[in-house]
Amino acid sequence: MYGTRGRLTKDGIRLHEPADFAGMHRAGRVAAAILDAIGVRVRPGVSTGEIDAEIERLVAGHGAASATIGYRGYQHASCISVNHVVCHGIPGPKLLKDGDILNIDVTVIVDGWFGDTSRMYVAGSPGRKAERLIQVTHDALMRGIEAVRPGASFGDIGHAIQTHVEGQGMSVVRDFCGHGLGRVFHAPPNVLHYGRPGSGPVLEEGMFFTIEPMVNLGRPETKVLADEWTAVTRDKSLSAQFEHAVGVTAQGCEIFTLSPAGRFHPTWG
Ligand code: MF3
Ligand code: CO
Ligand code: CO
């Protein structure tokens, strides 16, 4: 039962026990393996609905459960966000075309632990600007992860991400953030992808959370479509996202969602 082990900080952030890391690694590895396996399906002429159906089969094949099916009324095993869709794109009949860029976000539950990760894919070959956007977004995530260690603050993570992105003339989305996770999907804190050094809660050993920056080629503003899920850039500019789940250790951090195949980025070519 959740809540029987570990402690909460004054900000309501759970400090997990050393033994809990193994459960998170198992769940994270399943989610990452599914993202490895789905790469060959991404090509022009395939629908995002077909990709999602395959993800649903892969989740079951791993003996896992989908965390997103039934979550607040969501009905799919993944979010697939194409081009100017920032996040929470709903899989459907629309066919991918050459040069489309897409984020595939999968969350699974394995033995009660949540594995949440997303990557960028390309149908066919990317345009130059799209490829640069994807590279900058990936590098921003990794810089955020490099800031994770006990005694650092969540603002340090956000600052590392924001500085890298804005230094490349791109913008960080403010309207969505990363989150604590563990035996729950979304827990405190909100992990902002922008911020000032030293601001926000201080990181402590045993915290588990995601870092999942969304980066736009144009302005940062988003809007949610009438389906109440799909978030898009207001200026229709391209958007990219990568997501890892991490746990804070005495030394720094462990990434729970590393690609077993070493294919986190790039996922094409
Ligand atoms: N996986 C997303 C995240 O990173 C959440 C998706 S919720 C859904 O937090 F319902 F849209 F699937
Ligand atoms: Co997440
Ligand atoms: Co996710």
Image: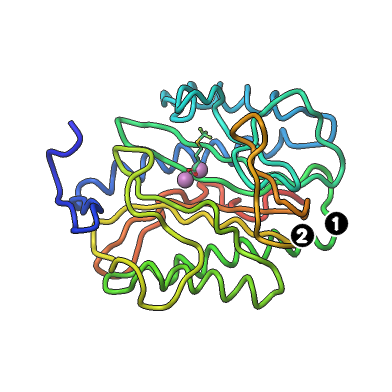
Q: What number of labels is visible?
A: 2
Q: Which residue shows up at 66% across the image and 49% down it? A: 120
**How far apart in space, not on screen, are marks 2 and 1 (Cα)?**
6 Å
Identity, as a three-letter code, of the amino acid under mark 1: Gly
Q: Position of residue 70 (x, y in %)?
A: 46, 22
Q: Secondary structure at mark 1?
A: loop
Q: Is mark 2 within 8 Å of ligand 3?
A: no
Q: Secondary structure at mark 2?
A: helix
Q: Position of residue 129 (x, y in %)?
A: 81, 62
Residue designated by label 2: 131
Q: Which residue shows up at 30% across the image and 30% down it? A: 111
Q: Which residue shows up at 81% across the image and 29% down it? A: 95
Against 48, residue 253 (above or below) is below
Quadrant of the drawing holding the N terminus: top left
Q: Position of residue 45 (x, y in %)?
A: 84, 30
Image quarter for residue 185?
top left
The reply, left or right, for residue 62 in relation to residue 90 is: left
For disc 1, the neighbor class at 10 Å (few under 14, some 14 to 19, many from 20) is: some
Against 147, residue 180 (above or below) is above
Identity, as a three-letter code, of the amino acid under mark 2: Glu
Question: Residue 193 versus residue 112: which sits nearer the camera?
Answer: 193
Against 211, residue 119 (above or below) is above
The reply, left or right, for residue 226 in relation to residue 74 is: right
Image quarter for residue 105?
top right
Residue designated by label 1: 127
Against 36, residue 57 (above or below) is above
Q: Position of residue 189 (x, y in %)?
A: 34, 54
Callouts 2 and 1 close, C-beta under 8 Å: yes
